[in-house]
Image: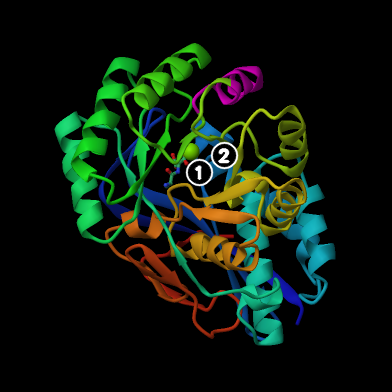
Amino acid sequence: MKITGLRIGKLSVPLKTPFKTALRTVEAVEDIVVLVDTDTGHVGHGEAAATAVITGDTHGSIIAAIRDCIAPHLLGADVADLNRNTRLVQTALERNFSAKAAVEIALYDLFGQLYGAPLYQLLGGGDPVITTDITISVDYIDKMVADSLAAVDRGFESLKIKVGKDIGLDIERVKAIHAAVEGRALLRLDANQGWTAKQAVYAMQALENAGVQLELLEQPVKAQDIRGLKYVTDRVHTPVMADESVFGPTEVVDLIKMHAADIINIKLMKTGGISNAIRIADIASMYGVECMIGCMIETSISVAAAVHLAVAKSDAITKVDLDGPSLCAYDPVEGGVDFNESEISIGDAPGLGIGDIRGLEMLSA
Ligand SMILES: C[C@H](N)C(=O)N[C@H](CCC(=O)O)C(=O)O
Ligand SMILES: [Mg+2]
């Protein structure tokens, strides 16, 4: 099976409600989709999220990276040469991780189609059913409490509560949700870089002293502030997770050696796709460090790849934040992974199993 071309499209899907973090407010998924064509008629599917505030990637940069830098290396490549092909993607240009992720996802999808097996089986197998949390956007306290209770009623057993806007209000937000939920769900906090290290320690000690039990605290401080992250990790009982502070395997090794965080959030849009995500999971496993698999505002195309990875690497990936498709007003993808509220399951289709994509607008070559 030989690669004959790459096509690029744009996909817009409204969210059920606006997604609000300390970094941004988003009302729709607006992602780039890549289709990798082959001489056998098989098509590989990938998706890139333009999360400029986190990865620096924009629609324009993703399109240019794929079209001008990555695609020329892959024309004529054999789909069976997966490791060679992912190396070509990773070395085609510096950074541009979301563009690399989209193309890698499509290459792994084709690899699964070539061998007629769901991707997770080729990555080592596992139980094809996982459970995700759901995000509670940062908002007025009453709204966050109502959203949390609605999520618990829908069966979500873990809530990822967005904070990082105002330290005093954040503490009140979490206390109110904790009181309302009454232990029916685990609570994870994500400050999306909104606090200083000292504020984070103050907030966590206030919550711990008030008897609020939290599963973890994600990215309390600025992405570059690794010393601040360690400062927090050293001083609070709640496990601290690095998200925006770590993208690739080298950063993960540094972070683990410094003991700057307890948990690593792996996202395909930060790692540049599946090959480096596998490396991170294996490094973490070697060091006995837990990982979460996360996503940006993405549809079920790229999140499907994250699900396959999570299933195959469940020794290291013990926490799942793959709620992107649940936040969408509808699933634009025919086939693929089944996202049913908190339960995510993979069927028998080869690769990622993705069929037609509703509303995909192809861009001219
Ligand atoms: C969607 C997921 N639950 C999530 O919260 N991801 C964010 C970043 C999402 C974005 O701004 O696109 C995170 O973990 O920080
Ligand atoms: Mg995060």
Where in the figure is residue 228, as x and y percent of width and height? 59, 17
Is residue 59 a member of the stretch shown in magenta?
A: no
Q: Earlier in the sequence, mark 1 or mark 2?
A: 1
Quick check: can you spot residue 8?
no
Look at the picture and state if 7 lies above or below 30.
below
Where in the figure is residue 143, as x and y percent of width and height? 17, 37
Give SS at disc 2. loop
Judging by the rendered image, the residue that carries numbered circle 2 is 57
Give SS at disc 1. loop
Q: For residue 75, what is the image quadrant?
A: bottom right
Name the foreground residue: 304 vs 293: 293
Question: How would you rate the neighbour count of disc 1 (Cα within 10 Å): few for under 14, some for 14-19, many for 20 or more?
Answer: many
Q: Amino acid at mark 2?
A: Asp
Look at the picture and state if 263 lies above or below 304.
above
Quick check: can you spot residue 89?
yes
Q: For residue 273, what is the image quadrant?
A: bottom right
Q: Residue at x 43, y 29 (%)?
A: 191
Q: Is residue 257 left or right of residue 112?
A: right
Q: Is residue 52 left or right of residue 253?
A: left
Q: Residue at x 42, y 15 (%)?
A: 202
Judging by the rendered image, the residue that carries numbered circle 1 is 50
Where in the figure is residue 354, as x and y percent of width and height? 50, 75
Name the foreground residue: 153 vs 252: 153
1 and 2 marks in contact (CB < 8 Å): yes
Is residue 221 a member of the stretch shown in magenta?
A: yes
Where in the figure is residue 156, as x and y percent of width and height? 31, 57
Marks 1 and 2 sit apart, C-alpha to C-alpha, by 5 Å
